[in-house]
Image: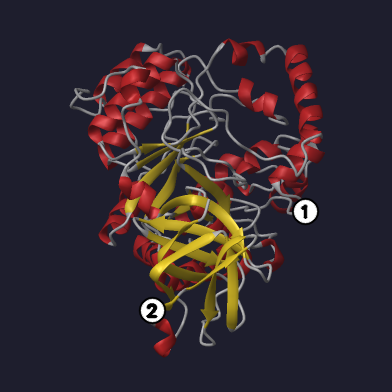
Amino acid sequence: MRLLERLPGYLYKLCHRGFSCAPMSTRFQPTLESLRTHAVPDWYHDAKLGIFMHVGLASVPAFAPREHDINELLQKDYWRMQPLSPYSEWYENSLRFPWSPVAKFHREHYGDRPYAEFRGDFERAFEGWDPGPWADLVAESGASYFVLVTKHHDGYCHWPTKVPNPRRPGWNAQRDFVGEMGAAIRARGMRYGLYYSGGLDWTFETMPLATLGDVMCSVPGGDYPAYADAHVRELIERYQPSVLWNDIAWPTDLPTLFRLFADYYEAVPEGVVNDRWLTRSWVTSVLRNRPIRYAADWLLSKMLARVEGGASLQPPKPPHYDARTPEYSVFPEARTEKWECVRGIDKSFGYNRLSRPEDHLDCEALLTSFADIVSKNGNLLLNVGPRGEDATIPEVQAERLRWLGAFLRTHGEAIRSTRPWVRAVGQTDTGIDLRFTARESVVNILFMRRPEAGPVAIEGLLARPGARVRWLGAAGAAASSGPVEAIELSTGPRIVLSVPGTLDDSPVQGVVLEGVENAA
């Protein structure tokens, strides 16, 4: 063990060469100019819905406070936000604060049992695991892609990696969970992406994390940067992920990261990288000085407390990315850059045994949020957290995936393969909020509340002669295309649609319009 701890960086350089994502880059060079020629692929624009999955050792105790969501803590209890985190996958960190609810729970149920011993419970629970039913459920949701956590902050790897952990040898699965889940997902026609925690690894850095300043200064150095680089290269070579989803930050310097990106794009030309790749810099080094970190945290806490409308977790922009990833938050306006709202079904990513039914998104909140995100050039990456004690997906989570699938089967024409229109939002004369999407010359309207039968007017739209409307949720003859009435008023143009009385029960209703354009 002592010898392993002292292994110099050349061991990881050998691993780096061993997993080089060959062939080396020819189209993309490890420069910012070259990387920015990579376009976000059409499949990712078209997808709209992805399913995330957090499952690991922390899914065994599966405990976190449920009273506040992460953005409330960010604004109202900044100095204790991490020990009080509603994210059950942060269990090991919360356990390091003796006063935390997690530490109290652990003492009552597990005594002084080390966190690492949950590995045995987890691996025994998954001995008979079959990825097929999980992949079936993901497919039933209507998702186009799936992202699996391969290594979270506790450092445990869900694949039989050949890159040794110098601090905790053998800290990885012998069974290839990553490969088996990927095969099941791809067999059902979906894209497969991989999450990797590059910014945190608690087998390398054990400092208790309470604030954002703590998090940013705890990105491991030493032999960890080469270790993480070798890991991700191994994942690319083995699994060819369509999405490379890093978390927190990235431990190497920029030239090393740019080489990784160039090789990834060469290996997976239609690949997507997210925006959580901020590399180590003098700032992270300075924050290791406790008085300076305290001052930075104090200033940040004051700024967040004054944010109107609530604070939100939005990663700082790195030099290169394909998609932004706000967490449990959305952008208020349509964006030209692609983005992805990442969130859980409740307040946690990992399964939380404390979560109550009211902590989970209801059908209306789920579907209206989805429609809003899509109208603003976003995707929804919705997380599922299986139980670690029996390798099952809780029914309350599975139900939400089926809601999405039912909605997309009927109203998906207004969602999938669309692009933002010239305007994202609107409202009817009766006060129903609207979201707009487009596909070539067709305009789609998503009613954010089920309208009553009868006429409904929308201002600011022009109907050309022969304009037609089709209600996706209508049954019988009402499902066929009908005329659009155009009216010119002194306040400007408007269209009037006739709402059929046979709409389904979906809280979001999709409408397809042909021959309609924006009046502005």
Q: Is residue 101 left or right of residue 365?
A: right
- Secondary-structure class at tag 2: loop
* Figure check: 345 above or below 240: below
Q: Quadrant of residue 264?
A: top left
Image coordinates for residue 145, horizontal then vertical, percent = 37, 53
Residue drawn at x 25%, y 36% is 269
Q: Residue furthest bottom?
A: 476
Q: In this figure, what is the number of numbered marks? A: 2
Residue drawn at x 54%, y 21% is 220
Image coordinates for residue 511, horizontal then vertical, percent = 47, 70
- Secondary-structure class at tag 1: loop
Q: Quadrant of residue 128?
A: bottom left
Q: Are marks 2 and 1 in contact (CB under 8 Å)?
A: no
Residue drawn at x 49%, y 14% is 222
Which residue matches tag 2?
A: 481
Q: Quadrant of residue 17?
A: top left
Which residue matches tag 1?
A: 67
Between the residue at mark 2 and the residue at mark 1, the CA separation in whole angstroms equals 48 Å
> Which one is in front, 365 or 257?
365
* Badge 2 density bin: few <14, some 14–19, many ≥20, Cα 10 Å: some
Q: Is residue 41 left or right of residue 141?
A: left
* Badge 1 density bin: few <14, some 14–19, many ≥20, Cα 10 Å: some
Mark before the other along the chain sequence, 2 or 1: 1
Tell me the kind of residue under disc 2. Answer: Ser
Asked if residue 99 shows in the view, the reply is no
* Figure check: 88 above or below 116: below
Label 2 or label 1, whichever lies nearer to me, is 2
> Which one is in front, 42 or 63?
42
Asked if residue 72 shows in the view, the reply is yes
> Which one is in front, 514 or 316?
514
Image coordinates for residue 393, horizontal then vertical, percent = 51, 64
Tell me the kind of residue under disc 1. Answer: Glu
